[in-house]
Amino acid sequence: DAGVTQSPTHLIKTRGQQVTLRCSPKSGHDTVSWYQQALGQGPQFIFQYYEEEERQRGNFPDRFSGHQFPNYSSELNVNALLLGDSALYLCASRYQQDEQYFGPGTRLTVT
Amino acid sequence: RKEVEQDPGPFNVPEGATVAFNCTYSNSASQSFFWYRQDCRKEPKLLMSVYSSGNEDGRFTAQLNRASQYISLLIRDSKLSDSATYLCVVNENTGNQFYFGTGTSLTVIP
């Protein structure tokens, strides 16, 4: 049983560009959350998707958007990249109120 | 004020030592509490949930004090493999948003 998977593993982008990160939840999970983890910080909640809808959003600008597909996989899109967007982006999945499982993350570097 | 606050450390302790981490949270309506472990350049993994009655899992004991809004993690007989960052996590009553502390770094020294 595969756990949460994310792609790509690493990514380098230039300021102003756009990026799409992908996440496949653990089998049986229907809820996907995205987090941003800057170096030396804890993960910060970006948003959560359930039934293809954004259910809750953290304190992130509209440049951060997402999508959930019928198979529960999810994408995180970031437009107009800033240097400060460089971070580890973590996807976590869960079934209802059960334990949250994290993927290995995508390390984004903006130059 | 941050929703969850932790002492970032680092804590450097010898093998066999007992070490304790504390964490405070700001929202008194918070419902669920957890400790996660994160190894260098890896994803966080659930270490244990924290219940009002306190709970123990082998060498690890977690406690919750709702009146003072703090959570603790005690590690007894530290092993080299315990070296990691320990993240305190709080889930508010909607159940949807998890707030993470900055993490406390632990290094167990031979």
Image (cartoon, coloured by chain):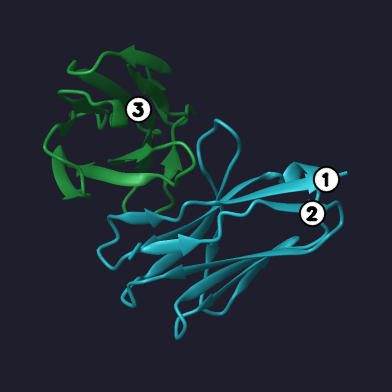
Q: What is the number of the mark on residue A86?
A: 3
Where's residue A38, x and y in %?
40, 37
- Amino acid carrying mark 1 in the image: Ile
C-alpha gap between disc 3 and disc 2: 32 Å
Q: Secondary structure at mark 2?
A: strand
- Amino acid carrying mark 2 in the image: Val
Disc 2 or 1, which lies upstream in sequence?
Answer: 2
| Residue B58 in the image: above or below residue B109 | below
C-alpha gap between disc 2 and disc 1: 6 Å
Residue identifier under label 1? B109
Furthest residue toward bottom: B67
Q: What is the number of the mark on residue A48?
A: none
| Residue A65 in the image: above or below residue B108 | above
Quadrant the C terminus of chain A occupies: top left
CB of mark 2 within 8 Å of CB of mark 1?
Answer: yes
CB of mark 1 within 8 Å of CB of mark 3?
Answer: no
- Image quadrant of residue A107? top left
- Image quadrant of residue B17? bottom right
Which residue is drawn at the image coordinates 31% and 65% (left, top)? B92
10 Å neighbourhood of mark 1: few (<14), some, or many (≥20)?
Answer: some
Q: What is the number of the mark on residue B13?
A: 2
